[in-house]
Image (cartoon, rainbow, N blue to C red):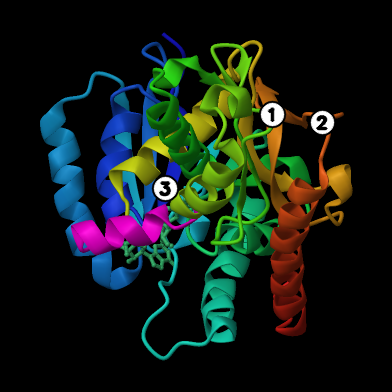
Amino acid sequence: MNSPVKVAVTGAAGQIGYSLLFRIASGELLGKDTPVQLRLLEITPALKTLEGVVMELDDCAFPLLAGVEIGDDPNLVFDGANIALLVGARPRTKGMERGDLLEANGAIFTAQGKALNDHAADDIRITVTGNPANTNALIAMSNAPDIPTERFSALTRLDHNRAIAQLSAKVGAPVSDITHMTIWGNHSATQYPDLFHAKVAGRNAAEAVGDDSRDWLENTFIPTVAKRGAAIIEARGSSSAASAASATIDHTRDWLLGSPADDWVSMAVRSDGSYGVAEGLISSFPVTTGDGSWEIVQGLDIDDFSRGKIDASVAELDEERTAVTELGLI
Ligand code: NAX
């Protein structure tokens, strides 16, 4: 049995946390041979709720769970953390402008970036799920000068998985047949789910979709994937939680343990300028991963349609970066 890995989770008393913690503790993040210690951060008013969640974790008697620490001080909770899943964020409330949202989250992610910088373990890997995820990751990364920038990432795996599910349903193939899916850009309505490189049982996805592929791509696939979060709120009365937790697990597990051979995954990572995405933005790319590192897949053909879509989403990320720069957050 390996020694316990310290996994910090923020927003641990929230809805995503309620799904995520139990899956981590059961071994779905790091495998059945790796014990985990959970280190859970919440704001002070939510600590009592979090105590209840910890009681339930205890009651599962997970053999791999080697302890749970909770608290409201990131400097203590992130102490020695090997993995940090930053899920907690300030939601947009009625009347809140976008600038207000960036500012409220800026306060959270500057403090958490600094705390990770000062207290996390040397091998820390950070996944930001809390929205606006890409820019929150940029803020945390910019406030953690001693942590290599490639250790920060933001979640677009939920969008990636949604895109796989939509294509699978359209062509009537199992999800396991769908490979090489890509989400480009921001985790927002401007994201670009790219069908052109995707494959169905090794066959080009556009061909597999058939004659109406262009119409389906533009008028069904892209809007369905990009607006799926809103559709779930409409149906369920609250935002996606179990699927977001599942994607957070997929993203972080593949980062640490490796993406499938002859395939890639989507992750928002710091751009090195690949595919014309401005350097330094946290933008989603096709990446291959293994052993805690990632590499952007190079050399994909980008046609004019895809170029326009990628540029539009990257322009939004650039605007967000300008806004948080002006607010003095990065
Ligand atoms: P909840 O509102 O249920 O839970 C959020 C929790 O974060 C709350 O318990 C709150 O007390 C806590 N929190 C707030 N500020 C904190 C801080 N400074 N330190 C620690 N904890 C803090 O939201 P939930 O449904 O769990 O969603 C969490 C975040 O994920 C939201 O920002 C949401 O927008 C985002 N999502 C991101 C997705 C993605 O694909 N990247 C998809 C799902 C989800 O919408």
Placement of 17 over or under 230, stated as above or below: above
Pointer 3 residue: 9
Residue 195 occupies which quadrant of the picture?
top right
Give the distance between the C-alpha atoms of the residues marked 1 and 3, in whole angstroms: 34 Å
Nearer-the-camera pick, 244 or 159: 159
User: Is the residue under label 1 in contact with that under label 2 (CB below 8 Å)?
Assistant: yes
Q: Amino acid at mark 2?
A: Leu
Quadrant in which the C terminus appears:
bottom right
Q: In terms of sequence position, does the residue under pointer 1 or pointer 3 come before the other?
A: 3
Q: Residue at x 24, y 18 (%)?
A: 63
Residue 54's mark?
Answer: none
Q: In terms of sequence position, does the residue under pointer 3 or pointer 2 come before the other?
A: 3
Residue 300's mark?
Answer: 2
Query: In x, y percent, where is residue 252?
Result: 52, 33
Highlighted range, magenta? 226-237
Pointer 1 residue: 197
Q: Nearer the viewer, mark 1 or mark 3?
A: 1
- Binning the other alpha carbons within 10 Å of mark 2 as few (below 14), some (14 to 19) or many (20 upward) gives few
Q: Amino acid at mark 3?
A: Val
